[in-house]
Image (tube, rainbow, N blue to C red):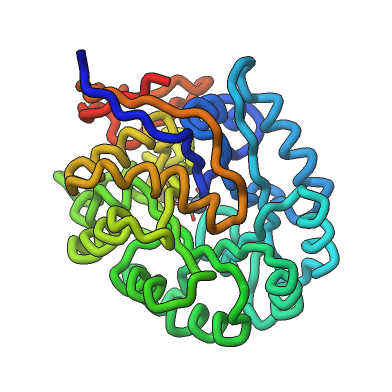
């Protein structure tokens, strides 16, 4: 019989579901593996009101297959002029678990986001007071800044000043990709944490150019040099509760990825947990996967641990080349490859 790994049912602390038919297609993949997910608000139009978040949550719930247990945790898309009252009321009423800071122009559907963090000071002050977490896409946006330096520059120019002004604000530095980010999180107080994706644990920037241009390895923040990948991997597998699972699964139809101007985003939801298991096993710390996947996130957010377990088996798992999606398929992370773990339920 294959070796089994059984862990407490995990959560995904950073995820894109999209909307409409795409949402209906992708929700079951996440609901199968995860009990909860922090759902990103970068729809068109973005989720900037309590009403929009309630309606979006209903649509997600309607897409959860019968018999699966899943709770979407919604986020507010911060803009230059969102009101602190709206943010606070949505949090108090249990609609918004967190709020998301996208620097305007940093990534997919971020054009109407925050042009200057100074415009958010009133909102952040309120969030700090009520203990509402801030999720941060940590990249500066200037076209003069090298794309591989944008995360490191964000730490110096935005994050360090931010946590000095709001020392008690809960901050999740999302999808970290650099040693700089690891060092920053380690040196910051306990109210600053980070999520880590499978792709940033498994790929370095060579993956973008392996035998030709590889659009399915392209996401933002872009994958970095090997030394950064190793630092992020060491952080994820260290057992430190400041680091937890966030897939940043971000589906785009195949034609939008394989294009002269391909979209950023990697669709890893169908076998995310298996990818993390592979990394933890390679590092010889499979016993730490449960903390990273199922315990550190709830502890940071102040939410209960999930009941129940999930089971992975150590068997060859061939990832399909494509996943059917109407007339434009999705290409999953690690398409066509064989990975050593399989989620069995
Ligand atoms: O690669 C990414 N895709 N990074 C993001 O920050 C956004 C996401 C998306 O929404 O496609
Ligand atoms: Zn994201």
Examine the rendered structure and indicate whether residue 93 appears above or below residue 242.
above
Residue 184, image quadrant: bottom left
Residue located 53% across and 20% down the image? 326
Q: Nearer the viewer, residue 143 or 275?
A: 275
In-image side of 156 versus 122 (left or right): left
Q: In which quarter of the image is the C terminus?
A: top left
- Regarding residue 220, the answer to whether it shows in the image is no
Residue plotted at (28% across, 35% down): 334
Query: Residue 109: horizontal and vertical position, in percent?
Result: 59, 54
Q: Furthest-left residue in view?
A: 211
Using the rendered image of the protein, determine whether residue 44 is visible from the camera's viewpoint.
Answer: yes
Q: In this view, does 59 lie to the left or right of 181?
A: right
Image coords of residue 220 (percent x, y)? 42, 57
Residue drawn at point x = 79 percent, y = 38 percent: 55
- Residue 64, percent across and down? 63, 24
Q: Quadrant of the N terminus?
A: top left
| Image: 282 above or below 271 | below
Q: Residue at position x 20%, y 27% from top?
A: 338
Residue 136, x across and y down, in percent: 54, 65
The total of numbered circles placed on residues is 0
């Amino acid at each position: 019989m294959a070796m089994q790994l059984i862990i407490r049912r995990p959560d995904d602390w950073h995820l894109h579901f999209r909307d409409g038919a795409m949402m209906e297609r992708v929700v079951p993949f996440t609901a199968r593996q995860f009990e909860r997910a922090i759902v990103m608000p970068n729809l068109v139009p973005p989720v900037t009101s309590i009403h929009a978040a309630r309606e979006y949550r209903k649509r997600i719930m309607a897409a959860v297959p019968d018999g699966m247990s899943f709770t979407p945790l919604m986020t507010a898309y911060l803009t230059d002029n969102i009101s602190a009252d709206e943010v606070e009321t949505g949090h108090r009423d249990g609609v918004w678990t967190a709020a998301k800071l996208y620097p305007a122009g940093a990534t997919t559907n971020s054009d109407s986001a925050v042009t200057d963090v100074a415009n958010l000071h009133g909102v952040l002050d309120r969030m700090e007071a009520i203990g509402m977490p801030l999720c941060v896409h940590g990249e500066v946006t200037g076209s003069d800044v090298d794309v591989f330096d944008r995360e490191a520059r964000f730490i110096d120019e935005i994050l360090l000043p931010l946590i000095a002004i709001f020392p008690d604000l809960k901050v999740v530095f999302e999808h970290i990709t650099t040693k700089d980010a690891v060092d920053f999180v380690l040196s910051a107080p306990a109210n600053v944490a980070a999520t880590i994706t499978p792709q940033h644990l498994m790929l370095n920037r060579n993956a973008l150019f392996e035998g030709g241009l590889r659009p399915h390895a392209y996401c933002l923040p872009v994958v970095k040099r090997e030394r950064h990948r190793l630092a992020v991997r060491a952080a994820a597998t260290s057992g430190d509760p400041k680091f937890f699972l966030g897939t940043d699964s971000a589906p785009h139809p195949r034609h939008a990825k394989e294009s002269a101007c391909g979209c950023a985003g990697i669709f890893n939801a169908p076998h995310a947990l298996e990818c993390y298991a592979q990394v933890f096993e390679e590092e010889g710390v499979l016993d730490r996967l449960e903390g990273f996947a199922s315990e550190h996130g709830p502890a940071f957010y102040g939410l209960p641990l999930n009941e129940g377990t999930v089971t992975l088996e150590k068997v060859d798992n061939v990832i399909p080349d494509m996943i059917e999606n109407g007339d434009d398929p999705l290409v999953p992370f690690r398409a066509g490859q064989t990975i050593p773990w399989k989620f069995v339920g």
